Amino acid sequence: GAVVSQHPSWVICKSGTSVKIECRSLDFQATTMFWYRQFPKQSLMLMATSNEGSKATYEQGVEKDKFLINHASLTLSTLTVTSAHPEDSSFYICSARAGGRYEQYFGPGTRLTVT
Amino acid sequence: AQTVTQSQPEMSVQEAETVTLSCTYDTSESDYYLFWYKQPPSRQMILVIRQEAYKQQNATENRFSVNFQKAAKSFSLKISDSQLGDAAMYFCARLGAGGTSYGKLTFGQGTILTVHP
């Protein structure tokens, strides 16, 4: 149990375009989802926290207009990178937590390359 | 800032031997949770072991055990009988239980573990 999927696993887009990444909890209802960014051989940095039906809370330094997060249902959250630039290239990981529980379950990640 | 520090960027161990990965953290909370995660080359985050701060007993999961020193804010991971499949990047993480850090994981910098046959 407690499986989280991400789609796509790998995406290449041109500079200036937008790309959407989906995060789904497959066998539980995720009241909270988290989005992280990870550069090669570095740690995970929390970008934002989203609660179902509410606006996402962004960490300091994260551009909310660039990284749009939507958590419209208890099993789906999306991260849209708008007007992507090469510096947005990174590995994006989501995690999900069920209500009343503290443990987060991680998706397999999405590698974004902006050319 | 409530940080998590892993002072060993890289560690290596011989197969079947024991290795200990270090982690210290900073917190003003009395209740929190600590985790060790493994990230293999696939980059999927895998939970290795968890420790509730209110529990004095050190957590153990098969070959993995922790040495939790609450007063010293230290949380080391011991891997016994190391296997080739243990090779990965290991992250120590703290889960906030209150205030602005409630429910958020703060990760250490990571330790790359190499296992030699």
Image: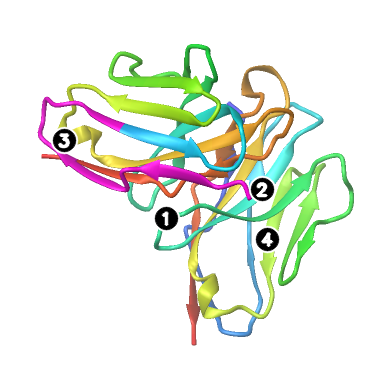
Residue B43 badge: 1
Please say if the residues under marks 2 and 1 sit with CB atoms less than 8 Å apart.
Answer: no
Disc 2, SS: strand
Residue B7 badge: none
Pinpoint the chain carrying mark 4: B
Question: Which segment is the magenta one?
Answer: A1-20
Q: Position of residue A20 (x, y in %)?
A: 29, 30
Question: Which residue is at 78% across, 52% downward?
Answer: B68
- Between disc 4 and disc 1, the foreground one is 1
Residue under numbered circle 2: B35
Q: Mark 2 packing: few (<14 Cα in 10 Å), some, or many (20+)?
A: many
On screen, B59 above or below A6? Answer: below
Q: Mark 3 packing: few (<14 Cα in 10 Å), some, or many (20+)?
A: some
- Give how far apart the Cα atoms at labels 2 and 1 are: 17 Å
Residue B77 badge: 4
Tell me which amino acid carries mark 2.
Answer: Phe
In terms of depth relative to the viewer, which is nearer, B7 or A54? A54
Residue under numbered circle 3: A86
Which picture quadrant has residue B80? bottom right
Tell me which amino acid carries mark 1.
Answer: Arg
Disc 4, SS: strand
Please tell me if label 2 and label 4 are on a single chain.
yes
Residue A10 seen in render: yes
Colour scheme of the rendered structure: rainbow
Question: Which residue is at 74% across, 59% downward?
Answer: B66
Tell me which amino acid carries mark 4.
Answer: Leu
Q: Position of residue B46 (x, y in %)?
A: 56, 55
Which picture quadrant has residue A19? top left
The stretch drawn in magenta includes residue B19 = no
